[in-house]
Image (spheres, helix red, strand yellow):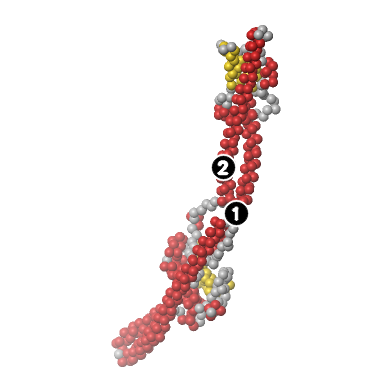
């Protein structure tokens, strides 16, 4: 399976990711905060209602005492000038910060008493008292009318200082907030731990997806206890199996097509070598013979015979180049390394010291099938041609390595071939990169790599220049024989 990866560098877009655990914790915190706000509102409303109830109780109790005093005055048991008299009631009924007053129907206020705040009372913040007063204390005062024998005698009004009410409300809310904050923290911790344990299998799922994206189609997920995750595992495994089968089938078909192409090239090369090359050789010999005879018997046609000899030699040289392009004879006669060494030597000859081409080989390549060796040669040939046309490099290195494969899922993948072509070109920039990646040469490489069930990566080298890297598995000698 082939893949072409190109890094866009600083222009690459960053994709934001979300952690499900923290997402749930944040949402729980938001819901909890809304609940706390609602609960705090209920507490503040209850405090205001309690204040009104206390004012009502005080006003009604004093009203009863004053009504009893009026009854005693009517019975001559009390003096009228002592009305109103609530000293006994005021001493034990009023709360800190509470005031009570008696007002005659004409507006006169003969009596008014207040109890100051306790010095130990914890006052509310300065910003809290006015806000609380506007929102909740609009109906906190209570007035109780005093009526005796059908005549209004006055009104008893009980009030509670807003500072005292705010202090009481702040104390209740502070106590509640402290408890609720601890509960929210414990709940968030428990949710995080529970969700983390529940989502641990997702790490295996993500690892499987990454392996699948990297081309490891043999990856399979285990069964999970959670039903939803187990369903994901089943779908993943089924998809991976189908994709593996499809890829094997396409790879096999591509391999057959490319191998058939190489066989046709080899057949054409042999036909050209056995027929056309022999005829050109005979023609060259005949032209030389004519030139020798013409020099003695017909000197006037000597120039034409020289042109005939030159044309025959050029045709032979062109045929040799065509045969090398179709099928290098060294691949079948001497092996892969000898053919690559010849290719490197030819490139150095053409470069005339402007560019140095180097071949580094590690491992054994004698057991490679002939068609696989031909694929490696073609990929190297196209890579070198790209470097010559676009790289403007001083050095081009071809590194060929054979080592045991890291993928042991299949028995026929015990060895791995890695081909790297890297240059130190600096003169073409992004334009050169675009030509390298968009050319038909890389398309042909990708087809060959896909036929080999391998991967292809191309892009800027970490050390500068351009790098082409090909990895593919290869059959061992035992596997090939089987």
Task: For residue 354, say whether it is visible.
Answer: no
Q: CA distance from mark 2 to mark 1?
A: 22 Å
Residue 212: give x, y in percent of width and height: 52, 63
Residue beneath the point at 32% across and 90% down: 294
* Neighbourhood count class around disc 2 (C-alpha, 10 Å): few under 14, some 14–19, many 20 upward: few
User: Which numbered dot is residue 457?
Assistant: none
Front residue of 412 and 67: 67
User: Which numbered dot is residue 31?
Assistant: 2
Task: For residue 237, say whether it is visible.
Answer: yes
Residue 94: give x, y in percent of width and height: 66, 21
Q: Which residue is mark 1?
A: 198
Residue beneath the point at 61% across and 46% down: 188
Quarter of the image for residue 302 reads bottom left
SS at mark 2 in the image: helix
Q: Above or below — where is 430 with respect to 342?
A: above
Q: Above or below — where is 444 with respect to 16?
A: below
Residue beneath the point at 63% across and 48% down: 190
SS at mark 1 in the image: helix
Residue 49 as seen in the image, left or right of residue 377: right
Q: Above or below — where is 409 with respect to 101?
A: below
Front residue of 200 and 300: 200
Front residue of 385 and 208: 208
């Amino acid at each position: 399976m082939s893949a072409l990866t190109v890094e866009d560098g600083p222009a690459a877009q960053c994709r934001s990711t979300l952690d499900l655990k923290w997402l749930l914790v944040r949402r729980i915190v938001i819901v909890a905060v809304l609940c706390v706000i609602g609960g705090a509102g209920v507490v503040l409303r209850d405090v205001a209602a309690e204040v009104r109830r206390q004012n009502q109780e005080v006003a009604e109790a004093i009203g009863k005492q004053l009504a009893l005093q009026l009854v005693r005055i009517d019975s001559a048991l009390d003096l009228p000038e002592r009305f109103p008299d609530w000293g006994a009631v005021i001493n034990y009924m009023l709360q800190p910060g509470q005031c009570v007053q008696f007002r005659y129907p004409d507006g006169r206020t003969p009596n008014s008493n207040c109890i100051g705040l306790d010095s130990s009372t914890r006052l509310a913040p300065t910003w809290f008292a006015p806000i609380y007063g506007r929102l909740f204390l609009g109906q906190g005062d209570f007035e109780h009318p005093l009526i005796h024998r059908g005549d209004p005698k006055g009104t008893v009004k009980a009030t509670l200082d807003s500072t005292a009410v705010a202090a009481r409300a702040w104390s209740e809310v502070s106590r509640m907030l402290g408890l609720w904050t601890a509960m929210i923290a414990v709940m968030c911790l428990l949710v995080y731990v529970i969700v983390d344990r529940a989502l641990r299998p997702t790490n295996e799922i993500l690892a499987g997806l990454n392996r699948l994206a990297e081309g490891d189609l043999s990856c399979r997920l285990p069964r999970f206890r959670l039903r939803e995750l187990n369903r994901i595992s089943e779908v993943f495994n089924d998809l991976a199996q189908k994709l593996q089968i499809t890829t094997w089938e396409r790879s096999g078909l591509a391999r057959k097509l490319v191998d058939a192409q190489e066989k046709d090239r080899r057949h054409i090369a042999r036909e050209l070598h056995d027929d056309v090359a022999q005829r050109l050789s005979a023609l060259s010999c005949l032209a030389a013979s004519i030139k020798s005879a013409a020099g003695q018997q017909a000197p006037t046609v000597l120039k034409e015979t020289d042109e005939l000899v030159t044309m025959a030699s050029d045709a032979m040289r062109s045929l040799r180049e065509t045969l090398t392009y179709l099928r290098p004879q060294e691949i079948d006669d001497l092996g892969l390394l000898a053919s690559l060494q010849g290719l490197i030597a030819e490139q150095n000859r053409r470069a005339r010291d402007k560019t140095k081409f180097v071949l580094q080989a590690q491992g054994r390549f004698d057991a490679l099938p002939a068609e696989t060796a031909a694929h490696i040669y073609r990929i190297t040939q196209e890579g070198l041609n790209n470097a010559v046309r676009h790289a403007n490099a001083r050095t081009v290195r071809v590194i060929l390595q054979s080592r045991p494969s890291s993928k042991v899922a299949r028995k026929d993948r015990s060895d791995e071939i890695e081909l790297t072509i890297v240059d130190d070109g600096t003169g073409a920039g992004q334009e050169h990169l675009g030509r390298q990646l968009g050319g038909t040469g890389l398309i042909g490489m990708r087809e060959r790599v896909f036929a080999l069930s391998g991967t292809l990566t191309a892009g800027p080298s970490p050390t500068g220049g351009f790098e082409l890297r090909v990895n593919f598995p290869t059959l061992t000698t035992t596997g090939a024989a089987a």
